[in-house]
Each structure stands twice: as structure tokens, then as C-alpha cells.
Image (cartoon, rainbow, N blue to C red):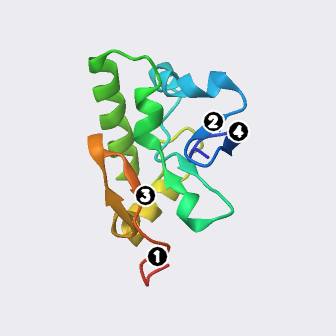
Amino acid sequence: MPLDWDHVWTEVFDGSNWIPLDQNCLHFARRLNEGIGSWTYVLAIADRCEDTEEVTERYLQHSNGTEEEVSAWRQQIHTARGDASGALTQSRTAQGHQLQLAGLRVAWQSAKDGELTKNNCDLPSKW
């Protein structure tokens, strides 16, 4: 589920990986080039807490973008997360900004290449 974007899609969890039912969704990061605004996070929400993940980096890597494009998209997403007005997002909402303020990174543990994975199911007390 991309935050601050105008649509969602369905993925299935096969026990170890999230697989989009519509493979076109793998490349949706390329839409950041269209000038329509950014998204702030991509969340894979499961029925079990331990299977829920923040998968933003994974989608950037699956986009088939050049190193320069992916770097620019990361910066665009980072900037949109910091925008309290939501004006930089495609849906003109500030959900990602609010999650950042509420401590999303406190509840998730850093992993390779900046991807975040669920450390445990305890969210910060502000939630």
C-alpha cells in the first residue's frame, strides 16, 4: 500500500516474499518521473504482524531505474516525508510525514540497503 498515492494493489505473501498479483505494480516507482507528486512509503500489510513490512526500498530496486533515477526518487520520497503540508505528494496528503513524526523508524529496524523490516510488533507509545 503506497502512502500519499491514489491507489493500492493486492499482493500475496508466500511465506517468505510478497508477490504482486499485477506485475505492473513492480515498476510503479517509475511514475515518480511524471511530475504528479510523490508517495512516502510502501507498506505490505499482512494479517500477522511479523509478516508486515515497510517495502519502499524494494519497490525502488524493482523499478529498473538507473542508479541516478533511483537516487533521485529516494530524495524525492525523503523530501515528501518531510513536508507537513502534503503538497509534495500525489494525493496531497501527509500520512507519510505523520508516520515519520510518530516514530515509524523506531518501530522498524534497519536492514541492508536501507530497507526496513519489522523488528517486533510493538509500535512506539505515541501510536
Q: Nearer the viewer, mark 3 or mark 1?
A: 1
Q: Earlier in the sequence, mark 4 or mark 1?
A: 4
- Residue 68 visible in the shown view: yes
Which image quadrant is residue 24 in? top right
Q: Earlier in the sequence, mark 2 or mark 4?
A: 4
Q: Nearer the viewer, mark 4 or mark 3?
A: 4
Q: CA distance from mark 2 to mark 4?
A: 11 Å
Q: Disc 2 vs disc 4: Cβ atoms closer than 8 Å?
A: no
Residue type indicated by callout 2: Ile
> Which residue has dot 1 on it?
123
Q: Nearer the viewer, mark 2 or mark 1?
A: 2
Residue type indicated by callout 1: Leu
Q: CA distance from mark 4 to mark 3?
A: 22 Å
Residue 35 or residue 16, whichever sits in front: 16
Relative image position of residue 11 (x, y in whole percent): 68, 40
Which image quadrant is residue 79 in? top left
Residue 13 or residue 54, whichever sits in front: 13
Relative image position of residue 100 (x, y in whole percent): 39, 62
User: SS at mark 2?
Assistant: strand
> Which residue has dot 2 on it?
19
> Which residue has dot 4 on it?
9
Q: Residues within 10 Å of mark 1 (few under 14, many from 20)?
A: some
Q: Earlier in the sequence, mark 2 or mark 1?
A: 2
User: SS at mark 3?
Assistant: helix
User: SS at mark 1?
Assistant: loop
> Which residue has dot 3 on it?
97
- Residue 88 visible in the shown view: no
Q: Earlier in the sequence, mark 2 or mark 3?
A: 2
